Image: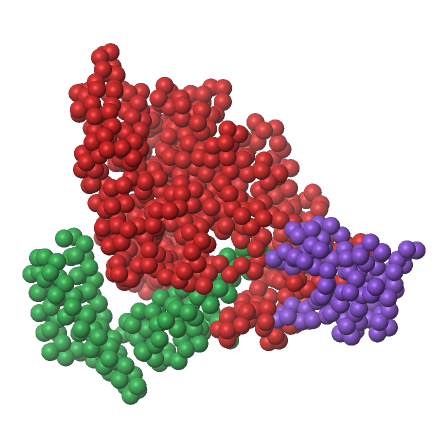
Amino acid sequence: MSRLAKNDFELFDIPPALDIDLDDLSRRYRMLQQAVHPDRFASSGDAQRRIAMQMSARVNQAYQSLKAPLTRLRSLLEIAGVDVSSATAALDGEFLGQQIELREELAAAHDRIELQRIRQSLSQACAMLFSQAADVHHAGDLAGLHVLYNKLQFMYRLLEELDRREETL
Amino acid sequence: MTITLTENAAQRVKSFLSTRGRGVGLRLGVRTSGCSGMAYVLEVCDEIAADDVVFEQHDVKVITDPKSLLYLDGTEVDFTREGLNEGFKFNNPNVKDSCGCGESFSV
Amino acid sequence: MALLQISEPGQSRAPHAVRRAAGIDLGTTNSLIAITRGGRCETLADSDGEHLLPSVVRYTTAEVQVGAQAYAASVEDPFNTVVSVKRLMGRSLEDIRHQGNQLRYRFSAQPGTTPRIVTAAGEVTAIEVSAEILKSLAQRARAKLGGELDGVVITVPAYFDDAQRQATKDAARLAGLNVLRLLNEPTAAAVAYGLDQREQGVYVIYDLGGGTFDVSILRFSRGVFEVLATAGDTALGGDDIDGLLAEWIVANAALGSDIDDRLQRRLLRAGKRVKELLSTNNIVGLDIARPDGTAWQGKLRRREFERLIDPLIDRTLVPCQRVLRDAGLDPSQIAEVVMVGGSTRIPRVRERIGGFFGRPPHVDIDPDRVVAIGAAIQADILVGNKRDDDMLLLDVLPLSLGIETMGGLMEKVILRNTPIPAARSQEFTTFKDGQTAMAIHVLQGERELVQDNRSLARFELHGIPPMVAGAARIQVTFQVDADGLLGVSAREQTRGVESSVIVKPSYGLSDGEIERMLRDSMAHASEDVGARKLREVQVEAARSIEAVTAAYQQGGRQLLSSQEQHELQSALSRLEALYNSVDVDAITRAMDQLERTAASLAERRMDVAINAALSGHRVDEFSGQ
């Protein structure tokens, strides 16, 4: 099978899981780029250079996606055939309540110290959701995994908002 | 003084000559050029010149000129496969330094 | 060593000759060219022994002067003498005005077109001015290496956007140079620096030059330089410090508001001199002749100078903060901070940056030459002189790329600091029933509103099958190459209508214009355009034959069916038979045919390379399939 058609995990030749060794991933990334980067084919023909560029872009994309936990989770769902853009079962009221609280807190925060505190609690919440997701993935509960993915998307949106606030301070 | 051909290399030369349909042997030589000073010549030989030196191994004639022999004495020529590449390899005891690409050398 | 094949009598292939390559640092204030010879890198001097070429071009009715001669005339002849042209590259008139009015050229005013500077020799664009500097540098390398250059690597600020990169590449084309790569300046510095050190770790390159500022974070490991994040300001540098000092003189010498252009250039030059002296002295005396004939004497202390420039240094700290955050690192994880660019000679800059990163920065390397040296090392590899070298540079996109969506908003398609080459596709749809065409507006920048980002290009996709609003699926693909240059294509998914564009900056030159300029310059050089074209095509064909032959020898027999081998061989011999002919079209056709035939071999070789890489082997150890 051509490597262009493989999924991210297959391309890097690692087992599909949420917990991965990031040092090993970056080592594999460098080895793959050593093999496919267009600079390796600078004196080759056009065809070879074009394919090298495509391959190198593909390796870059897979690396970006595997490196960050949220996109890694999305890759796992996609491999399992879940349409991640589709809606999941409604998120529980407790979670949504927590989201509203966090949003209000963020809107009210006016200095770096407060923002830093919110960042910490957000990071903790994300870490917890990811560890749940790892368990749920082990258990093979795809619907559960999809719900956790959606919750994490909410969390990441808050983090982005936080970045924006910090930059405008 | 001698130049040797491994059995693998001899086989390859024989099949090359038979596909080509003519040729008396394999001509080896050196000439100046390249990044490290000298480069190998590896050609099929149609005609043996008067001052040429001829060696014969595994039923294959190896022909060289006396000047080249100075630089090639003791060389073993092998045919190998490295990864996807295959070709002839010169194991030359006279080589002091070769360029990064290995296509030329100095003695 | 290389594996040899048996040749026909007298046909032994000459081993590759050393190819001529050079690295060029095309700077705001000064430019440099470096070459590698016998494994050693050196910058090249002019006949007076000067390595730095002032990036100044003077246009007179009689000639074009470049470098020191032009610099010497820049006060007397400000309108015809172009300085700091790098700040104008890929920029519109509005952008240039926005940068402040330190440079007072006469522009022929046509809003929305490429700015043209009016000189005694006619109107010139920034691209043409840069081409003159490149030509002058290339001449040094040609003289030293004894012939035409096979290729050059030109450095650009890491934070240069697509328009600025494209303008630089166009300038090289105009100068008749084959660009192997546009290399980011901090990355080039890291290459030159890394060769001395060879220590694994994460490095910060702080590059404050004459007119641009970059900060990059790189991880160096086993020959691979991986840029983790980059940020900067392409209109911030030593020039701005000169400008501040000029303003200071105006205020203190009570020169009033009526500063003519000669006085302005004189003040900028005085400011530059004061700046340089204050790097080693604590106090500098000034003597300024006023236009009315009176004189003003004053002095400036280092402490006061530092108060003046602190706000500028503060502006460099914002990008420093951002790269750390984008790379997900804190200062304690940085192995070393390397200072590059002439402006990092200022003690206050070193002090403040050292304070920010919590360690004294590394200042041992020559900040002026390191970028050109790094470019020369990379050029030597890319031109094919060092085939077995393991060094690899992995760079990133400095600014996000996106397209305009409804409501004047920018939708990002590729985010900043994405490793390049990169490709991303995104689907868009129609918003009216029966809509058959769609305009695509390509943008670069980080802001939400379209007008706050740089407009790169607009193109249209026609022939969308009429459907109800929202039913069409239009996939837009952005592809960024290793130079950081963007290509965009769009395809309607249900019917497969394709539209592709080469992104041409809104403020650059069209291919036609470049072609015309080349033609004009050759008319002067009395060289035949047709002959040049033929020579180019022949060289390209020879390169193609060599490349495909090499690829075939490295696995053609194992990877291709006998039918495919036969097709490849016949495409090869067709081009071999043609490439010394004078028929440009026939050569081009045969070349295209060969490239097409070679594509499947290229693809399979790539698969083999990947498998070998991950199983921990090098390709040349890999045996069989």
- Using the image as rendered, state which of residue C258 and residue C377 is in the foreground: C377
Relative placement, left or right, of A100 versus A126 is left
Chain displayed in green:
A
Relative placement, left or right, of C569 versus C393 is right
Quarter-of-image position of residue A67? bottom left
Residue found 48% across the figure and 73% down from its top: C614
Q: Residue furthest bottom?
A: A139
Q: Residue furthest left?
A: A108
Q: Is residue C224 above or below residue C186?
A: below
Task: Quarter of the image for the C terminus of chain C: give it.
Answer: bottom right
Chain displayed in red:
C
Q: Is residue C565 above or below residue C243?
A: below
Does residue C521 appear anywhere in the picture? yes
Residue A63 location, x and y as percent? Answer: 38, 68
- Using the image as rendered, state which of residue C92 and residue C33 is in the foreground: C33
Residue C208 location, x and y as percent? Answer: 32, 43
Q: Is residue A57 above or below residue A3?
A: above
Residue A69 location, x and y as percent? Answer: 29, 72
Residue C338 location, x and y as percent? Answer: 34, 50
Chain displayed in purple:
B
